[in-house]
Image (cartoon, grey):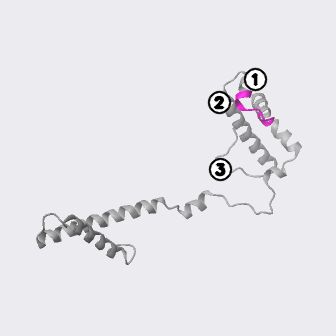
Amino acid sequence: MTYGRTDPEDLVQDVLAKYVVAFQEGPQLNEQSSMAWLATALKNAFISDLRKQGVHIKAEPDPTLLEAVVQPRPEASDQPFSATISDQDLELAMQTLSPKQREVFEASARGLRYAEIARQLGIREGAVAKRVFDARKRLRAKLMEIKGLKLPQGNGEV
C-alpha cells in the first residue's frame, strides 16, 4: 500500500519514536493499550503520508498537459513571422483599423505611454489600452490572412 520498500519501515520507526517520547515519563500503558495506541498511530501516520504524497503528485506538472497546450516551437532556421511582413502588407492591414484604433495604435507605436495618449485624446487610459489591444488583434488576424496562415483557435478578429 506504500510506494517504496522502505516507506513502511519508516512509518513504523516514526510511530515507535513517537511512542517512546509520549510515554517516556508519563503513565505506563499495559500491553493491550500500547498495541491499540500503536495501531491507531500507525494508521494515522499512514493516512498523513498518503495525503502528503497526494499533494506532491498534484503539484507535479503533468507532461501530457504541457504537450497539449504548448504549440511546438518552429525550427531555428524558420524566420519569425514579423520578418515576413512587408511595408505593403502592413499598410494593407492598417486600413482595416477603425480611425480611433489607428490613431491610438500609431501613437503607441511612436512610443507614447497610454497615460500620455489618453491625455492628448481626452479619453480614459483603459480606453487607450483596449483600442491598442483590439488594433493589435485585428492587425495580426489581417496579416495572417494576407500570408495565407490560420490563426490559432480563440484568436479571431475583433
Identified at 28% across, 73% down, the residue is 12
Per the image, is 118 magenta? no
Q: Which residue is mark 3?
A: 153
Magenta range: 108-116
The quadrant of the picture occupied by the C terminus is top right
Q: Nearer the viewer, residue 28 or 138?
A: 28
Q: Is residue 72 left or right of residue 87?
A: left
Residue 47 % position (x, y): 31, 64
Q: Which residue is mark 1?
A: 120
Residue 69 is drawn in which quadrant? Answer: bottom right
| SS label for mark 2 | helix
Instruction: Locate residue 1 relative to residue 74 in the image: left or right.
Output: left
Q: Secondary structure at mark 3?
A: loop
Give how far across and how far down residue 154 sits, in percent: 64, 47
Label 2 environment density (alpha carbons within 10 Å; few <14, some 14–19, many ≥20): few
Viewer-proximal residue among 55 and 97: 55
Amino acid beneath label 3: Gln
Residue at horizontal 17 percent and vertical 65 percent from the top: 25
| Quarter of image, res 7 | bottom left
Residue on which the image places disc 2 = 126
